[in-house]
Amino acid sequence: MAGYTPETTAGGAGRGRARHPPLSSLVVSTIAAFSAVVVFAILRSAYDGAVSRTTTLLGHNLEPTPWHPFPHDKGRPPARAAFRCAPKLSCLPPLAQPQPEPGANASGGATPRQCPAYFAAIRRDLAPWRRAGGVTRALLEAAQQRASMRVTITGGGRRLHVELYYACVQSRALFTAWSLLQLMRRYPGRVPDVEFMFDCMDRPAINRTKHGGDGDPAAPPPPPLFRYCTTRDHFDVPFPDWSFWGWPETNIEPWSKEFRNIKQGAKTRKWQDRVATAYWKGNPDVASPLRVALLSCNDTNMWHAEIMRQNWDEEAKSGYQNSKLSSQCTHRYKIYAEGFAWSVSLKYILSCGSMALIIDPQYEDFFSRGLQPEVNFWPVHVAGGGMCESIRDAVEWGEAHPAEAETVGRRGQRLMQELDMAAVYDYMLHLLDEYARLMRFQPVAPPAPAQEVCEASVLCLAGEKQRRFLEASAARPAVSEPCVMPPDAGE
Ligand SMILES: *[C@@H]1O[C@H](CO)[C@@H](O)[C@H](O)[C@H]1NC(C)=O
Ligand SMILES: *[C@@H]1O[C@H](CO)[C@@H](O)[C@H](O)[C@H]1NC(C)=O
Ligand SMILES: *[C@@H]1O[C@H](CO)[C@@H](O)[C@H](O)[C@H]1NC(C)=O
């Protein structure tokens, strides 16, 4: 341990002062040397203990989620992560508060913005706990068995703690903690104190039927569990996924920048110049029968469809030159196919302004509830005549009704334009507000080994590329009020 050399050299210097030291001095230096060894041993064991207990948002010392295993190099955190990034050292109060957007109008505008209609889903998602009389601590604790972490916000919406149970794939946990910190930065002191369980893996877990969703009065209320998606058959609560703050592993930029780039790229190809076929590019090897079946529609003559394989490992090697989303708005029709669960690709596909052909989605994320068939996308069905036939019919309809097809595409793009980061943060804020109102207990910061998380500790843990994405997605304090929720439809 190089860090402890000062003690040993101090002892050595003491011995070097006199050639023939008197006995008393010899005793003193022996005692000093002995104490140094003892202190060293104590510090070393404390250090080892701390490193072996330290879990991080990168998944150190954590097993992957048992319900969704993935290759994970567990490992102890490097000393850097264990100590330099420790909240005690890195989470000191910042010297300067972040400033609002330059040129922003501090008066905030007189008329408050209405939230997009799909914000109404927040009340629907939380309805089971309204019916059950609220979220009790016992219900919350019951959700732990399917959670990868517990998230606690205290101190009037100013302090964030996470208690980590399992590792999440790639940098999801890191970026999700960051998303909460940015919400707190955008709305200082406005985020409610809350405590919730979060699973950052793909598939929903809380079975609706088993928890009274079909009207069984004897069924127990569902444990509240946040994740990135849900389905109609589940009570998981959808929350914006990490990719809005960037996805370094696939080189996808934070959403505000990525959307701008895609829209810019889309402008260079007018509708009439786009290829009159349906296009899909993605990874078919994600344990998704749907994507495998989609490969068989790869025939421009018979099905008017082009299905291309995305190989992320190859892409990474070639510097992502062929996977730029902004140069993929080349076709009039763009296919969206779910993968292992929901897919973050939905928003990039809709951004092109091509008509999105969405194949029977099972999963919902927070904004996909804003999709309306034949209004802002075109539905493709697997059942009935078959998926390839359904794709072919959609393309033939679009070619027979070019103005309508273009309008559907444009409305899809507008849905994405309105899904700016302001809307994403507002969704998070309203969701946490409504959830906090249902909580029947006071949130308390969990004791160690749970950790406080702050921007500096997240940035400290992040690798170079992750750090670049995190910094690029930092929020500014809002200069206007959050959008106003759509009226309560009764549930
Ligand atoms: C700021 O808002 C006020 C009132 O809402 C308006 O009169 C003023 O022109 C705005 N200034 C800028 C720079 O937008
Ligand atoms: C929920 O549980 C019921 C009853 O055990 C089962 O039939 C159904 O398939 C489950 N639903 C899901 C989505 O797992
Ligand atoms: C689909 O067909 C095209 C043209 O024949 C081919 O280049 C491409 O590799 C095919 N896609 C897949 C996933 O095999």
Image: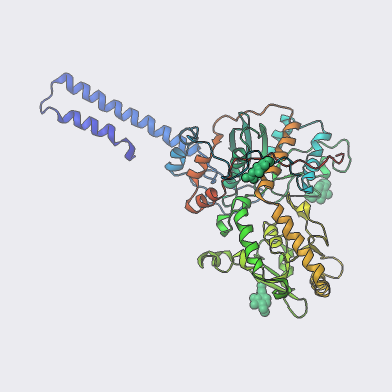
Judging depth in this view, the residue of 67 and 450 nearest the camera is 450
Q: Is residue 227 above or below residue 31?
A: below
Quarter-of-image position of residue 356: bottom right
* Residue 357 shows in the view: no
Q: Residue at x 74, y 51 (%)?
A: 367
Query: Which residue extends farthest top?
Result: 24
Q: Residue at x 69, y 57 (%)?
A: 347
Q: Quick one: quadrant of the C terminus?
A: top right
Give left or right: position of 11 versus 410: left
- Count of numbered tags: 0
Q: Quick one: quadrant of the N terminus?
A: top left
Q: Is residue 472 above or below residue 397?
A: above
Give the x, y percent position of residue 46. Answer: 42, 32
Judging depth in this view, the residue of 107 and 5 nearest the camera is 107
Q: Residue at x 82, y 67 (%)?
A: 404
Give the x, y percent position of residue 70. Answer: 60, 53
Colour scheme in use: rainbow
Quarter-of-image position of residue 135: top right
Give left or right: position of 197 versus 41: right
Give the x, y percent position of residue 167. Answer: 58, 46
Q: Residue at x 55, y 52 (%)?
A: 72
Judging depth in this view, the residue of 424 and 440 nearest the camera is 424
